[in-house]
Amino acid sequence: MFSRPAAFIFDLDGVLIDSMPLHRDAWRIYLNRLGIPIENIELRMHGRRNDEIVSEFIGRDLPASEIFEHGAAKERLFREMMAPALQAHIVPGVREFLAKWQATPRAVASNAESANIDFVLDGAGLRGCFSVIVDGHQVARAKPAPDVYLRAAELLGVAPADCIVFEDSPAGVEAGRAAGSRVIGVGTHTMDLPGTELVVRDFHDPALERWLS
């Protein structure tokens, strides 16, 4: 048991920004334009990389270039929808938490595309809070494989076991645990995140500072 974490690693969607409802709506709109109605979109997309989602929702035999373009087109739609409300969707307490722990190395590690990570970090003014950024296309395997978290820890120069991962999805929790890190759940959409050390509603939750202390 270490008394102070050596580094923090944050997922993006659902941890830094409460974006899942808009991702769900963007997928629904995009798929409707293609004439593809999908049930239970949110459950089937949560925590997954776009190439996996496109393969399941649109077609498993599509060429890689077409899979990429479908994913990119959906994300362009998402950014268009999110842009006017970006600041309002930042998870409560994130800015204060990052300021308080500014001496601790921090990374973003997400299945999201780099364009979305840039959109959120630059639009919210959070870019300078993170020394390392790893997106889902920089590693061979998406979450729930541990690759993004192992890579982030490597770039931070910290052992994965000395990192605290913040996650909001079961796939992300599994990835963090598989990397050997301790995982704190952020309950933007569900407080039912088995395998976490703690689940907090947001970064204002007093249980978070108590646990870290």
Image (cartoon, rainbow, N blue to C red):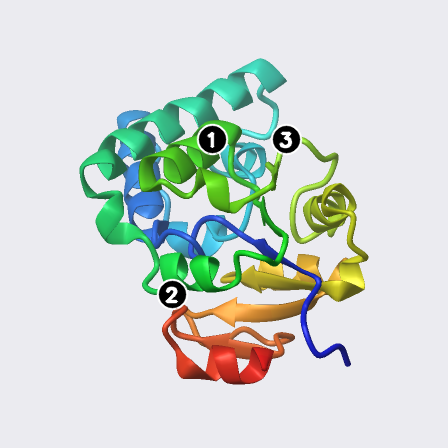
Q: Is residue 44 visible?
A: yes
Instruction: Name the residue type under label 3.
Output: His
Between residue 60 and residue 102, name the one nearer to us: 102
Q: Say few, some or many: other residues with alpha carbon within 10 Å of mark 1 (under 14 / 14 to 19 / 20 or more).
A: some
The spot of residue 111 in percent (x, y) is: 57, 42
Q: Which picture quadrant has residue 122?
A: top left
State if disc 3 and disc 2 touch (CB < 8 Å): no
The residue that disc 2 covers is 188
Between residue 25 and residue 160, name the one nearer to us: 160
Residue at 54% from the left image edge and 61% from the top image edge: 167
Between residue 14 and residue 159, name the one nearer to us: 159
Q: Sequence order check: which comes first, mark 1 or mark 2?
A: 1
Compute the Cα span from label 1 to label 3: 20 Å
Q: Is residue 90 above or below residue 49?
A: below
Residue at 67% from the left image edge and 53% from the top image edge: 144
The residue that disc 1 covers is 58
Instruction: Name the residue type under label 1.
Output: Ile
Task: State left or right for residue 19 relative to residue 64.
Answer: left
Residue at 37% from the left image edge and 29% from the top image edge: 74
Disc ID at residue 50: none
Instruction: Name the residue type under label 2.
Output: Thr
Q: Number of callouts in the render?
A: 3
Q: Sequence order check: which comes first, mark 2 or mark 3?
A: 3
